Amino acid sequence: MKVLMYSDVFGGPTTTFIYNDLISLAQSHQVKYLCVQRGSSRIDYKDVEVVEYREGRIKKKLKWIMEKNGWYLGFSNKQFSEKANGIISHFKPDIIHCNFGYEALRLTDNLNEVNKKIPLVINFLGYDASFHLNRPSYVRKLKEITRMANVYATCNTNYLKNNLESKKIHFCENRVIYTGVRLDFFDRKEIYPEKKK
């Protein structure tokens, strides 16, 4: 199966769990990672596509004010849309997997009609199903994408799943999938010198 994974940043210092999911998935499937920027960490993967998402300072500020006040939330961007859809159309994924609900909106707002038909799974991991749900514009936007027949959700806790449901955000399917962290990735033995008696 071909899987396109998406998040705004690939290889950020706090997203090692996404990297673990990616490596695990890539053992039995062809996986391409699409992102807006690469993080500055030691995480690397061979098939990462970076598509910049640029907005002017004034436009960004106005959009933030509208989002913060619950009036509007939108991520349509012609240049980002053209490049992202080009990559998706060329790769032809069987499924699109988005990490973080808030970031998934950047991609869903820019998919063309053909790519909107690809099954899409949004993985809710924290703020995207808790803090951000306090913004009416965000809740409305999630409700919009639940109307698409091929959009599914996963949450890494029952708490997050219940938060979505309490706001009447019902995906055609929403499952809890606990996400673990490989603790050996944070091994500090090589960092500190051994103390001898």
Image: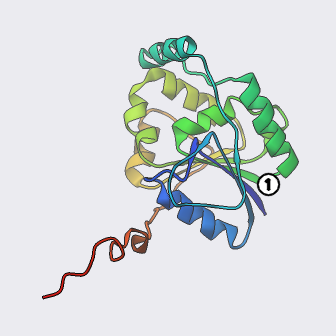
Which residue is identified by label 1? 94
- Relative to 38, residue 146 above or below: above
- Relative to 24, residue 83 above or below: above
The answer to whether residue 86 is left or right of residue 59 is right
Extreme residue in the left direction: 197
Residue drawn at (78%, 45%) of the image: 118
How packed mark 1 is, by other alpha carbons closer than 10 Å (few <14, some 14-19, many 20 or more), is few
Residue drawn at (42%, 32%) of the image: 132
Question: Which amino acid, mark 1?
Answer: Asp
Quarter occupied by the N terminus:
bottom right
Viewer-proximal residue, 134 or 180? 180
Q: Is residue 147 visible?
A: no
Which percent across, then down, holds residue 138?
50, 27
The answer to whether residue 131 is left or right of residue 80 is left
**What secondary structure is found at the residue carrying circle 1?**
loop
The answer to whether residue 9 is left or right of residue 150 is left
- Relative to 87, residue 197 above or below: below
Which percent across, then down, holds residue 81?
75, 30
Quarter occupied by the C terminus:
bottom left
Residue drawn at (68%, 29%) of the image: 109
